[in-house]
Image (tube, rainbow, N blue to C red):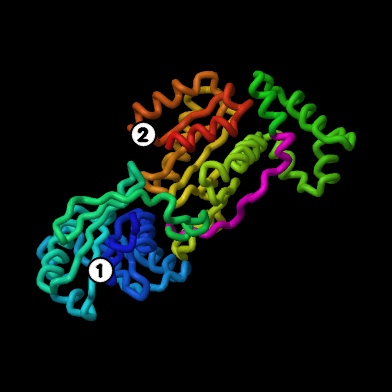
Amino acid sequence: MSMGRFKTEYLFLLVGANPLPNYVASLLLAKEGGKVILLHSRGTGMVAKNIERAIKDKKVPVATEMWEIDETDGVRIAQKLEKDIFPTLDAPSSVGLHYTGGTKSMAVHAYRALEKHAYEKEIPAVFSYLDARTLSLVFNLSDGSSTKREPVREKVKISIEELMALHGYRIVSSVREPLFPAQAKKLANLYHQGIRSREEVEREFLAGFDKGYTSIGEVADGEGIDRGRLNGWVADNHWLEHYVFWAVQEIAGSVGIHDWACEIKPASTSAAVSKRDSQGKDFEVDVVAMRGYQLYAISCTTFRGKQNCKRKLFEAYVRASQMGGDEARIGLVCCSDDPALVQQEIEEDWFTEGRVRVFGREDLADLPEKLRDWFEST
């Protein structure tokens, strides 16, 4: 089904806490040369500004405009639209309302006001929301036709940088190529076999080179790697992140992943943040992949205890949900001998069925294929 029939000259967006659905709608539903009107409450003004900035940075050929409206008072919402906003529209040929964001009151009264305006002006109106469960746009048209549904995940490609910028972050640092993937794979096989002593890990790592290195320091000097970074890579098990990152890279083309990175350190672009946050130290994402506009975030740990694994996954779940909304999918690669139990308890405790996946020690040997199955099943 073509998206053309759903595009409108004036597209109204109800801005909520998560900017992603509205950004997707602006890219798909605004006619070239038209206008996107961001309706926000006092509390979501910054979110609206981030969406507006993202549209401009993307060079979408539309104008943008922001209006603050009441988030709870239906009468004031309708009056704002009818008396202040609609009179500014320059004889529109079509209007649209995307209401994934905003409060229920905003959605109901904006819908009714726009429906009435379209009827009086005898112009078509398109009403839509983004269904996170099916990654589809759902449409109701003013012509009385039945509800339409259009899958859209593959129609919009959003980069990691775009997603971060939508939430007011810039990326301070990230890794785009895995470090020593062959050696990381060797270490993953060690853990798969149940061997995890520091001595054996270091021995296996050194054996992965044919230059006769006898210490991690020699490897760092010989391969041009910072000693501190490489020591953390081995001793603090950062190799697992790079192994997972390599596995994602291996399957990216076959499952529709168009952007991926690891060790992502964001920093807020707001001047009001603390010094600690402005340095990008408040959080770090182990491995991220973008599939259309859908975020996949994978947390990595060599922990095998259930509580430690659940804590690690919870941190990733909270952050990924903030960034990617209900569409986000969250994975944990760990060394648990019973990842199914960890996943079951998480789904029962957090009501996250279908959104999380836990990979354990047995999955390490053939992780690319296990990740492929996960991506294809979602």
In this rendered view, identify the residue nearer to me: 271 or 69.
69
The image quarter containing residue 73 is bottom left
Q: Is residue 236 above or below residue 167?
A: above
Q: Residues within 10 Å of mark 2 (few under 14, many from 20)?
A: some
Q: Residues within 10 Å of mark 1 (few under 14, many from 20)?
A: some
Q: Is residue 128 above or below residue 308?
A: below
Q: Is residue 296 left or right of residue 29?
A: right
Q: Is residue 238 above or below residue 336?
A: below
Residue displayed at 23% across by 68% down: 95
Residue 45 visible within the image = yes
On the image, the x and y values in percent for residue 79 come to 12, 70
| Residue at the outermost right position | 212
Residue 80 visible within the image = no
The tally of labels here is: 2
Q: Of the residues under marks 2 and 1, which one precedes in the sequence?
A: 1
**Magenta-drawn segment:** 167-184
Q: Secondary structure at mark 1?
A: strand
In the image, which disc is placed on residue 315? none
Q: Is residue 378 above or below residue 120?
A: above
Q: Amino acid at mark 1?
A: Glu
Residue displayed at 54% across by 51% down: 258
Residue linked to disc 1: 68
In the image, which disc is placed on residue 352? 2
Q: Looking at the image, is mark 2 or mark 1 nearer the viewer? A: 2
On the image, the x and y values in percent for residue 243 come to 64, 36
